[in-house]
């Protein structure tokens, strides 16, 4: 694929206010030298984390015509990257999108957004979880948090997960289809730290990047982290360096935001730290475990 600028089809919702989904994905990937081609699954006046009475416009009925136009134009993508999907129909549409636009040397990333803290989001039931298990089989890389990893494997969510168990989860998720599995929000050291862990089936290596726990909860950090990893991989970084970049960016953004008296629901101040995305990796904190 000879695109002079790497091109990503980003299949996510768009919130007018609050930094999440496409409003963080587009600036992050653009800043990393990647062209973002949005496929908006819904338009919301705000994201759903901490806001009430928001306006929600479901775009499901328009997606197939939208995508068919791209297909007729012969547009090629270096990556297909999906996030929150609001219905089984949207999961089917993403699956069909991958089938239509699949190409060699393409990175297909599914962020299986379903819940957090051991609970599913309101729109997710057993049927949605089952279909998400089918969708990840089409991905090269998936980026669930610990809760979502448990749902995908039909395991019990618990915070005292041990190293051998998380390795087993990574391998089992990879056995479902994706070559690379990244699990975020893994507790470490009596919850004083959290970790991102990963497994790459090609070389059968496990990776871990620790980060200090900061007692706050900003929405959109998962979208931002996955976007940095996608951008990093597209410009040729190795998996552990991509993990490093993602963790360092999110940690810096949280620290830059946390120091202000600032509503958490508005998300991390990505605008203050975007320049960091193009800094060289001066020190790497990843571990082989």
Image (spheres, helix red, strand yellow):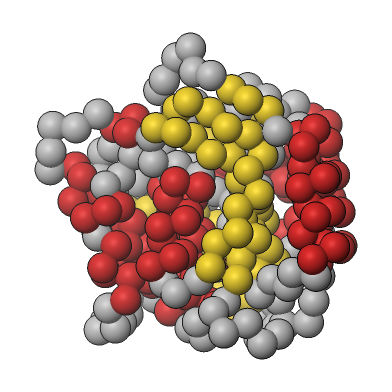
| Residue at 77% from the left image edge and 37% from the top image edge | 62
Q: Relative to 248, does residue 129 appear above or below in the rendering?
A: above
Work out whether residue 136 can be spotted.
yes
Q: Residue at left 66%, top 74%?
A: 78
Of 145 and 83, the residue lying toward us: 83
Taking the image as shown, residue 157 lies to the left or right of residue 277, namely: right
* Residue 205 picture location, percent across and down: 59, 80
Residue 278 location in percent, x, y? 32, 76
Q: Nearer the viewer, residue 169 or 265?
A: 265
How many numbered discs?
A: 0
Q: Quadrant of residue 201?
A: bottom right
Name the one closer to the observer, 89 or 124.
89
User: Residue 284 at x, y = what percent?
Assistant: 32, 80
**Horizontal relation, residue 206 to residue 171: left or right:** left
Taking the spot 33% from the left edge, 70% from the top edge, the residue there is 277
Q: Is residue 46 above or below residue 151?
A: above
Q: Quadrant of residue 81?
A: bottom right
Taking 144 as reference, is 125 left or right? right
Determine the residue located farthest toward the top in the rendered image.
Answer: 53
Name the foreground residue: 273 vs 64: 64
| Residue 107 visible in this rendered orientation of the protein | no
Vertical side of 163 occupied by 2: above or below: below
Image spot of residue 82 (x, y percent): 65, 53
Q: Quadrant of the N terminus?
A: bottom right
Which residue is painted at 39% across and 32% down in the image?
Answer: 17
């Amino acid at each position: 694929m000879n695109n002079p600028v790497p091109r990503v089809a980003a299949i996510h919702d768009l919130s007018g206010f609050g930094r999440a989904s496409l409003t963080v994905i587009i600036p992050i990937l653009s800043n990393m030298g990647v062209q973002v081609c949005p496929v908006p699954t819904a338009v919301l006046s705000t994201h759903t984390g901490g806001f009430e009475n928001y306006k929600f416009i479901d775009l499901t009925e328009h997606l197939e015509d939208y995508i068919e136009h791209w297909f007729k134009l012969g547009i090629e993508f270096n990556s297909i990257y999906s996030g929150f999907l609001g219905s089984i129909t949207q999961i089917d549409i993403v699956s069909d999108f991958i089938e239509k636009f699949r190409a060699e040397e393409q990175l297909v990333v599914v962020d299986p957004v379903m819940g957090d803290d051991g609970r599913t989001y309101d729109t997710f039931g057993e049927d949605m979880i089952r279909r998400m298990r089918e969708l990840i089989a089409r991905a090269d890389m998936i980026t669930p948090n610990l809760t979502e990893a448990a749902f995908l494997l039909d395991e019990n969510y618990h915070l005292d997960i041990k190293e051998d168990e998380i390795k087993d989860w990574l391998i089992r998720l990879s056995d479902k289809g994706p070559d690379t599995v990244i699990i975020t929000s893994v507790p470490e050291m009596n919850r004083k730290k959290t970790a991102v862990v990963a497994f790459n089936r090609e070389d059968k290596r496990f990776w871990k990047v620790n980060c200090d726990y900061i007692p706050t909860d900003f929405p959109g950090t998962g979208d931002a982290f996955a976007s940095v990893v996608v951008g990093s991989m597209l410009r040729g970084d190795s998996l552990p360096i991509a993990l490093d970049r993602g963790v360092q960016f999110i940690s810096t953004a949280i620290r830059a935001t946390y120091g202000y008296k600032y509503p958490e629901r508005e998300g991390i101040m990505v605008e203050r730290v975007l320049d960091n995305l193009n800094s060289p990796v001066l020190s790497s904190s990843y571990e082989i475990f």
